[in-house]
């Protein structure tokens, strides 16, 4: 079976379904998606925008996810993993600035306060930017999008800005005060 080099998410999903329903051997893309789960997806799909505030779609070159950047009619395929790493590095730097407060808050949320959990959290923070292959659940992306979270990149795939909502009133954000 011939695989086109440049593909859209819809083509990818259709091919995966076809490869399993046809009774033959599943395609390498279908196997990779099943084995690695979200690894073939762009981690921040739906949250990436260009400098003109236009959302970027996701496509594939081979098995690699790319953000599709419309540069005056020329569709650039920007490596999603590289952009996702930049965003994760940004988050890592912010967390490291307030590491003690962040860890204390996470321990409180988890209801734990032991040295093993604290060490595990410190390790996760230290290696946060290496977790591109783990993906992000679609529900988490939708929540971030609904809160106004946006990642702005340029035509070369460089991080320009991250727009984050002010969530200083976390209880009021989720309607906890209504209960």
Image (cartoon, helix red, strand yellow):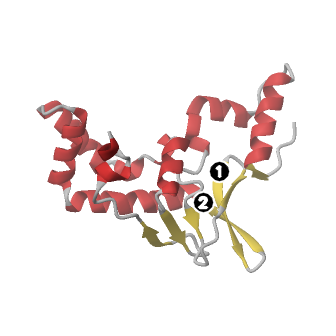
Residue farthest toward the bottom in the current orientation of the protein: 72
Residue 113: x, y in percent?
A: 13, 33
Q: Earlier in the sequence, mark 2 or mark 1?
A: 1
Residue at the outermost top position: 23
Residue 156: x %, y % from top left: 59, 74
Q: Residues within 10 Å of mark 1 (few under 14, many from 20)?
A: some
Disc 2: CA contacts within 10 A as few (<14), some (14-19) or many (>=20)? many
What kind of element bears circle 2?
strand
The residue singled out by tag 1 in the image is: 64
Which is more toward the observer, 16 or 112?
112
Q: Residue at x 39, y 53 (%)?
A: 129
Tell me: 174 left or right of 160.
Answer: left
Is 65 rendered above or below residue 75? above
Residue 79 quadrant:
bottom right
The answer to whether marks 2 and 1 mark residues whose Cβ atoms lie closer than 8 Å is yes
Is 15 left or right of 123, judged from the image as shown? right
Dividing the picture into quadrants, the one containing residue 14 is top right
Q: Secondary structure at mark 1?
A: strand
Can residue 110 be seen by looking at this rendering? yes
Across and down, in percent, residue 59 comes to 71, 54
Observer-nearest of 121 and 145: 145
* The N terminus sits in image quarter: top right
| Placement of 160 over or under 63, stated as above or below | below
Question: Of the numbered discs in the image, which one, if any, rests on residue 109?
Answer: none
In front here: 55 or 168?
168
Give the residue at x 48% y 62%: 148
The residues bearing labels 2 and 1 have C-alpha atoms spaced at a distance of 7 Å
Query: Does residue 136 appear anywhere in the picture?
Result: no
Res. 114 image quadrant: top left
Residue hosting label 2: 79
């Amino acid at each position: 079976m011939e695989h086109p080099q440049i593909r859209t998410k819809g083509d990818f999903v259709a091919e995966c379904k076809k490869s399993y329903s046809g009774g033959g051997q599943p395609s390498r893309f279908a196997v990779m998606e099943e084995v690695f789960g979200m690894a073939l997806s762009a981690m921040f799909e739906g949250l990436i925008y260009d400098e003109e505030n236009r959302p970027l779609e996701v496509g594939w070159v081979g098995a690699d996810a790319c953000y599709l950047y419309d540069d005056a009619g020329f569709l650039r395929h920007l490596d999603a993993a590289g952009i996702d790493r930049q965003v994760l590095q940004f988050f890592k730097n912010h967390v490291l600035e307030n590491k003690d407060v962040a860890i204390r808050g996470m321990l409180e949320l988890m209801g734990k306060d032991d040295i093993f959990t604290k060490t595990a959290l410190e390790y996760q923070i230290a290696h946060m930017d290496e977790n591109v292959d783990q993906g992000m659940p679609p529900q988490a992306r939708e929540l971030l999008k609904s809160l106004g979270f946006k990642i702005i990149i340029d035509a070369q795939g460089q991080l320009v800005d991250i727009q984050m909502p002010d969530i200083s009133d976390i209880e009021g954000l989720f309607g906890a005060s209504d209960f």
